[in-house]
Image (cartoon, rainbow, N blue to C red):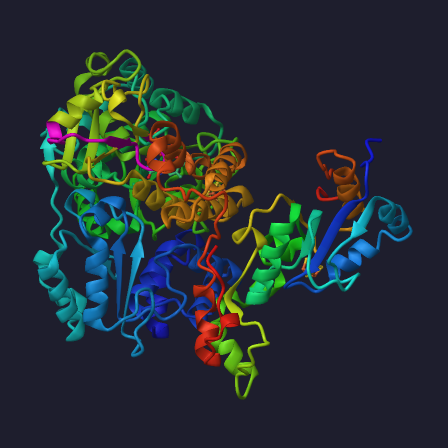
Amino acid sequence: MNAPRRKLKVATASLAGCFGCHMSLLDIDERLFALLELVELDRSPLTDKKHCGPCDLGLIEGGLCNAENVEVLREFRRSCKVLVAVGACAVNGGLPAQRNHLDVRDCLKAVYPVVPNDPELPLPLDKVHPLSDVVRIDYFLPGCPPPAEALWQFLTDLLHGRTPQLGHGLIHYD
Amino acid sequence: MTPAALHALLEKHRHDPTRLVQILREAQDVAGWISPPLITEVAGHLGVPRARVEGVAGFYSFFATQPRGEYRVLFSDDITDRFHGSERLRLDLCSQLGVEPGKLRADGRVSVGVTSCTGLCEQGPALLVNEHAIPRLDDARIAQVAELIATRHPLREWPAELFVVDDSIELRGWLLGASVAPGEALGHALALSPDAFLEQLAKSKLRGRGGAGFSTADKWRSAKQAPGPTRFVVCNADEGEPGTFKDRVLLRRQLDLVLDGMTACAWTIGAQRGFVYLRGEYRFLEAPIEAALAARRKAKLLGRDVLGHRGFDFDVELHLGAGAYVCGEESALLESLEGRRGIPRNRPPYPVTNGYLHQPTVVNNVETFASVALIALHGGDAFAAVGTPKSSGTRVHSVSGDCAKPGLYELPMGATVRALLDACGAVEPQAVQVGGPSGVLLSPREFDRRLCFEDVPSAGAFVVFGPERDLLDVVVNYAHFFAHESCGFCTPCRVGTTLLERSLDAIDAGRGTRRDVKEALRLSRMLRDSSHCGLGHTACNPFLSLYEKFKPTLERRLSSLDFVPTFDVDEALAAAREVTGRDDVKAHLEDV
Ligand SMILES: Cc1cc2nc3c(=O)[nH]c(=O)nc-3n(C[C@H](O)[C@H](O)[C@H](O)COP(=O)(O)O)c2cc1C
Ligand code: SF4
Ligand code: SF4
């Protein structure tokens, strides 16, 4: 196998997603140990690092629903050589994009008796967008969430320098 | 709508579910829109599932399943309408009436939207008000329309001159120029046996004028030989291809030739019933066509024992479409004729064996049937002597866009693009779109090419683009057309046409990159390879032509950056800034 010569740096983030994609990654179970032999985690919900250093690979779950999402995504794009949109939300906007036919002003007013104006709270975008609307994305991994097998296959392909290929049973079912 | 009125309407249509599109159209005329209770009533009386009626009501863009106002104004959104200022006129009318574009006014009385090309390109801009066409719009006409609506003048009392549609015939050949009595051509056809007439047709080498150019004699022969208790003849008068308006004029000026051709077809293949499927936009032709049909019945040109031929019974019904381009595709048209959503069928089997009600059916274009009548009059050899070896006869071109004399030009098959450009008075054209959006864009290098099946086939549209036009506008307009008209049945086209539209919109907005071009190329390949019908297969043609022949036009609109967002990210926060009242640093995003 064409194993990497050094551990690859990987960062992950969950933007407008449900953490389901991260959970699916954890579902590779004992293969996590094999994965950690190959990679070193940088910024990720699993490490709690706040900012992303130079990385080989960035995995992003969830789409863009607010200003902070955009900033995190841009930081990832600046820092990661390869950026992957993981899951339906990242690829297409997914479930959160269901709000796109509503006016965000009406949503806020419906939810809050007084709409909060604390600068610490990220402002929502008027529409939820897929990642590829704002930065260049190198790979798209569909699924809600992508099954653990698909994530494993995709990551091992990538880490071993093969062009990832997900065949029957991983993204094609008929 | 009162129960009595609905009852009378259903009675008129014999409670026949195949007439569902007609029933809904007429019910909407009375009721204003197709409400849920109306759907339930119609379904109950016809004995069909409610979902079927609702499905049909939701499919056609002229059917309103929500209140749409007493006056529903739809501006024709063809690129030629835009060239003539339709956008500004539409916004002017909106502001004069106090409506928001695309929305129903608060008092529920009027709405102003857009619709695909209405086939009045040479006398645009045009609009439809409750499906009645008003051409030649200008400031005065817009003010007049606004006034009539503001004072709630009933539509039938609007000045008739508003609705006058010109025929715009610029160059006549033997088809547009023919002056023969109703039934004369048919008499010639019926003087021959069905087999002998089919032989004349084969000699004529006539090929269909609706786009694909299939041999008419072969089509008729297949339908004639296909087993089945009964056969049908269908005239495709859907004419939805933007930029095409020849059938509109043929149906007005040479309707009897068309009906003679249809009746000759019935004689040849042994059919008893025929249909003219007329696009809803041409509703102004409904009354004249009905009148002509009635006159022909009286003259024994339709009905029992046509022209005294014992046992040859044939009649024709008029069906109106309701604003769906895909219904020009013959199998979708048949679905619509059967009272269903206009979704193209799997092919094969083809209509010649499994057409209307799954019986052998000939579907031909209006101009094809009119040409059949010429063949009956002049004989197959005379017809074949005109044009080129593989494209016989003449072709009626619908010319619009940047030229001195837009209108209809009938030329022998095989005329060069340049000959037509000269005839219509085009000055320094930078390109011509032949055959509508699903056809090809030709650059000046190709102006010596010939308009015929051997070289540049055409469904009849010829749109000229002058030196000042930005061809990207044209391609974007066409991309919107396909995304709007995709029937949604198959995923490659439903999703692909919308994604293609988005890529082109991004380029148009100055936010496009090389990636968008690559993406558009990938989508084009997918549309071509995996769509279910011709709409999807050809939806990428405008972009591909532009890419191939006018690459710099495309590239100069790309942003130089490797990647730019497809939308203005800071602008996307404006709504939230408004309701939170924030304007701090974190309430903004940089645009790059
Ligand atoms: C999306 C689509 C739209 C079409 N629209 C028309 C039309 O408006 N009129 C027409 O005659 N043919 C149209 N056609 C072609 C018809 O399917 C069919 O080939 C034609 O009516 C056959 O008649 P012809 O042999 O006389 O040309 C369309 C095809 C497609 C795929
Ligand atoms: S794709 Fe599905 S699992 Fe992943 S974040 Fe979105 S909703 Fe959750
Ligand atoms: S290609 Fe488009 S128009 Fe044709 S069936 Fe598919 S979705 Fe409908």
Taking the magenta stretch, the answer to whether it contains residue B426 is: yes
Q: Position of residue B152 (x, y in %)?
A: 17, 74
Over which residues does the magenta segment extend?
B423-440
The residue positioned 34% from the left and 73% from the top of the image is B1
Visible residue check, residue B554: yes
Q: Chief secondary structure of the magenta span?
A: loop
Horizontally, residue A126 falls left or right of residue B294, namely: right
Residue farthest along the front direction in this orientation: A53
Taking the magenta stretch, the answer to whether it contains residue B498 is: no
Front residue of B562/A158: it is B562
Front residue of B192/B59: it is B59
Front residue of B154/B20: it is B154
The residue positioned 44% from the left and 30% from the top of the image is B352
Q: Quadrant of residue A158?
A: top right
Q: Is residue B79 above or below residue B447?
A: below
Horizontally, residue A99 falls left or right of residue A1, namely: left
The quadrant in which the C terminus of chain A is found is top right
The quadrant in which the N terminus of chain A is found is top right
Horizontally, residue B468 falls left or right of residue B513, namely: left
Q: Quadrant of residue B446?
A: top left
Q: Position of residue B544 (x, y in %)?
A: 41, 32
Horizontally, residue A23 falls left or right of residue B495, namely: right
The residue positioned 34% from the left and 53% from the top of the image is B322
Residue farthest along the bottom direction in this orientation: A113
Q: Position of residue B377 (x, y in %)?
A: 17, 21
Visible residue check, residue B180: no
Front residue of A162/B267: it is A162
Q: Is residue A53 above or below residue B387?
A: below
Q: Position of residue A121 (x, y in %)?
A: 59, 76
